[in-house]
Image: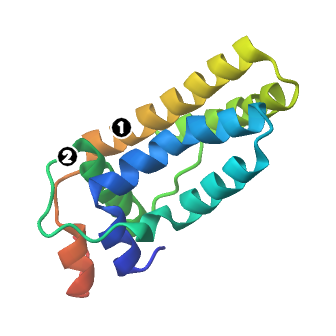
Amino acid sequence: MLPDFVWDRHSNPKSGWTRLLAYPLLIAAGYTRRWRVLGVTVLFVLLNPVLFPEPESPSDDWMATVVRAERQWSDRGRSFIGVGFPQVLNLVQLPVFAYNIYAVYERQPLETVVATAATMGLKLWFVAELVRRYDGADTASASRSGGRR
């Protein structure tokens, strides 16, 4: 479970969108063997959830809703990986991601592009399912007040 301040800052849509777009950059940097770009991008991905300020007001942006849905899912004690739906999407994503890394290592262009698209597609499908299940309860204010919704 992440601290409130991390969820609050990560709910800035810029955080989610830039984190999503960092994945193809990671893959491209690995494929082209640009190690500095790879290192900076990995650092960015790690720091991303706290790099952007907390939004002044809740955003209707889809990516902000994704973060709220992820938080609600986590706060309710649900796993992000498993055999149930939608967790199985992340489970399936693991070998696809591993193959993506292999394709990058072997510098297989078509396989790299397809595996990158599949990895991102599975992740977006997973978070779209979380958004679909999101009940709209304000998880940030619920956790600040000590209660769960």
Q: Is residue 126 visible?
A: yes
Q: Which residue is mark 1?
A: 129
Q: Secondary structure at mark 1?
A: helix
Q: CA distance from mark 2 to mark 1?
A: 16 Å
The x and y percentages for residue 72 are 32, 61
Mark closer to the chain start, 2 or 1: 2
Q: Which quarter of the rendering shows the C terminus?
A: bottom left
Q: Which residue is mark 2?
A: 61
Q: 69 or 108, which lies in front? A: 108
Which of label 2 and label 1 is nearer to you? 2
Relative to 82, does residue 119 appear above or below in the rendering?
Answer: above
| 80 lies left or right of 142 | right
The x and y percentages for residue 90 are 57, 40
Which amino acid lies under the numbered mark 1 shown in the image of this protein?
Glu
| 22 lies left or right of 53 | right
Q: 44 or 125, which lies in front? A: 44
Quarter assignment of residue 98:
top right
At x 76% / y 32%, what residue is drawn? 32
- At label 2, counting other C-alpha atoms closer than 10 Å, the crowd grade (few under 14, some 14-19, many 20 or more) is few
Which amino acid lies under the numbered mark 2 shown in the image of this protein?
Asp
- At label 1, counting other C-alpha atoms closer than 10 Å, the crowd grade (few under 14, some 14-19, many 20 or more) is some
At x 46% / y 43%, what residue is drawn? 20
At x 48% / y 73%, what residue is drawn? 1
